[in-house]
Image (tube, rainbow, N blue to C red):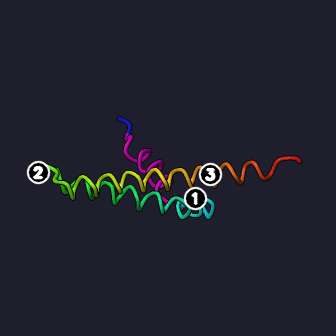
Amino acid sequence: MQIIAALQGLVTVASLDIEPTAAELDAIEQEMPLIRAEVELLDAQIMTIDRPANELDTRRIRRARNRVLVVRRELANRVSGTAASGGAA
């Protein structure tokens, strides 16, 4: 009889000891405004789950959606701007 659990333990332990790199942490930091905007949108949507949305809720959701779009655009322009600036002139 072979014991397979010991082999699975080695694979699991090795895969869980990995820390994020500095580059990954920087990427997360750059995306934090988008993450915050999406959380704000989610909060606005959660408030209207169990009841009909009134005029204030509708405005709050609309503003949150617009904020997400603005932040996504800014992030995309920042990423494309850095990629375009490194090209040959």
Residue drawn at x 54%, y 50% as measured from the top left: 73
Q: Nearer the viewer, residue 6 or 25?
A: 25
Q: Identity of the amino acid at label 2? A: Asp
Nearest the eye: 6 or 57:
57
Q: What residue span does the magenta drawing correspond to?
A: 3-19
Residue 59, given in percent of the width and then of the height, sits at 28, 55
Image check: 80 left or right of 40?
Answer: right
Dominant secondary-structure state across the stretch colored magenta: helix
- Element marked by disc 1: helix
Quadrant of the frame with the N terminus: top left
Residue tagged 2: 50
Which mark's residue is nearer the viewer, 3 or 1?
Answer: 3
User: Is 58 situated left or right of 83 in this image?
Assistant: left
Quick one: 15 or 9, which is closer to the camera?
Answer: 15
Q: Residue lying furthest front in this view?
A: 55
Q: Mark 3, residues whose alpha carbon is within 10 Å: few (<14), some, or many (≥20)?
A: few
Q: Mark 3 and mark 1: span between their CA atoms?
A: 15 Å
Task: Name the residue tied to disc 1.
Answer: 27
Answer whether residue 9 is magenta in the image: yes
How crowded pointer 2 is (Cα within 10 Å; few <14, some 14-19, many 20+) is rated as few
Q: Which amino acid does label 3 sit on?
A: Asn
